[in-house]
Amino acid sequence: MTVAIFSKNGLCAILLLVGLLLHSGVIGQAPAYDAEKQYQYPADPKVRERITKWQELKFGLFMHWGPYSQWDVVESWSICPEDWAWNQRTGPYAADYFRYKKAYEALPATFNPTRFEPRKWALAARSAGMRYMIFTTKHHDGFCMYDSKLTGYKVTDSSVPFSRTQHPDITRSLFDAFRDQQFMVGAYFSKPDWHSDDYWWSYFPPKDRSENYDRKKYADRWNRFIQYTNNQIQELMTGYGPISILWLDGNWANMDIGPAVTSARVHQPGLIVVDRHGLPKYVNYLTPEQKVPNHYIPVPWETCMTMGTSWSYKKQEQYKSARQLVQLLIDVVAKNGNLLLNIGPGPDGDWHSEAYDRLEKIGKWMQINGEAIYGTHPLAPYRKGKWAFTQKGADRFALYLPDSTENTLPAVIATDDWPVEKNALRHIRLLGYPHQLDIRNQSGKQVVQLSDAVRSSLANRPAWVFKIHLK
């Protein structure tokens, strides 16, 4: 044994250094979970086939919706006793957590979205080029937007005004309407349930997003909650027609979903399961949230992002421009991902007019340029400067993403950055322009020269696509 003797000041300095290292994670911390490296392709060939089909669709619709839309607040999180800038309570009950939570849980009594027309949404999404849809059947607050037989906290309960309409089961209506438009449909489901007395037990006050009791000490209660969760998942898997994706959220619940997945796939063969941040075997694709990775990812993944600033409805929402959204889609697809774009419906059962406007403009671009998106594969270098690259069969696509103030293509396009051999640059088209383009040599480089007429005829586009046919 070696004994070291330190002065008081020296010992303080060492303790301070150790504290800083612990705080920064340099020591005392397990290696970060690297989802890309730990990804496991599912062994079930039906699941692999479904994932391949899903990857070809590229563009989907996400919707967060519930009685909370009446308050213009973040979905669920304002009843969570954690102190974050984005989940602050507002309104007349904000100063008292327990009064606030009681009022929040009474919101279903006034939830009556009479303007709800699922076919209208399905048609708008289809026209925009979206090809799959995922809906929040139950968020963390525990309110079911479907007819669960296991709780009265649901949209079809007699205490909810909307239950007295002809088709009160919102999830069923949405799934049917979107399947009628040939959409692949998926169910978002929160594993945590802040309304369940077996998750936030009323004996204790909730202290954070997790269960508020010792699950080992009260094992019967925790096991009862697991069974409740599994049973609700099976309700969705057995009573709502063909479902392609089970999108599970709330990894902090940290429960074994294996039995639920096994049972679900008996009823829904080939079901894609996305247990976000869970065990790799139940994460059939990755889900970066509100961001696009800065690199190509070789495994299946999807960016989920809001069209506006919030997942839930806001009365005064600030939506991204159509140009931003189209370029976002291109950026994601070029890196091997899908884009799941969220729109938060309002308490009346409709979207903001701006949401329809954005979808219409995206759709106009997709009608001309969709062949560079659907069913394509990434093409190295994927992204370079203003360029993105995709390929499909014998066709390669070079997509030009202009700056926010750039409304026309440059008169001369240098092809040096295109991942195509120079002698293959013979058959080039600019999508939206009916004639083949000419390649010229300029100062020893091959370029595409565009006339003023061509540039003006395709002005003010979110992006432009050059198609190179290699045969």
Image (spheres, rainbow, N blue to C red):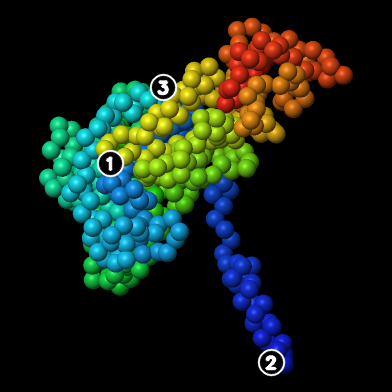
Quadrant (top left/top right/bottom left/bottom right) for the C terminus: top right
Residue 120 on image: x %, y %: 31, 26
Q: Is residue 53 above or below residue 43?
A: above
Give the residue at x 64% y 72%. Answer: 21
Residue 159 on image: x %, y %: 13, 48
Mark identifier at residue 8: 2
- Front residue of 364 and 423: 364
Mark identifier at residue 347: 1
> Label 3's element?
helix
Q: Is residue 288 above or below residue 216?
A: above
- Front residue of 143 and 393: 143
Quadrant (top left/top right/bottom left/bottom right) for the N terminus: bottom right
Disc 3 residue type (three-letter) = Ser
Residue 186 on image: x %, y %: 36, 36
Structural distance between the alpha carbons of marks 1 and 3: 24 Å
- Front residue of 217 and 436: 436
Mark in the foreground, 2 or 3? 3
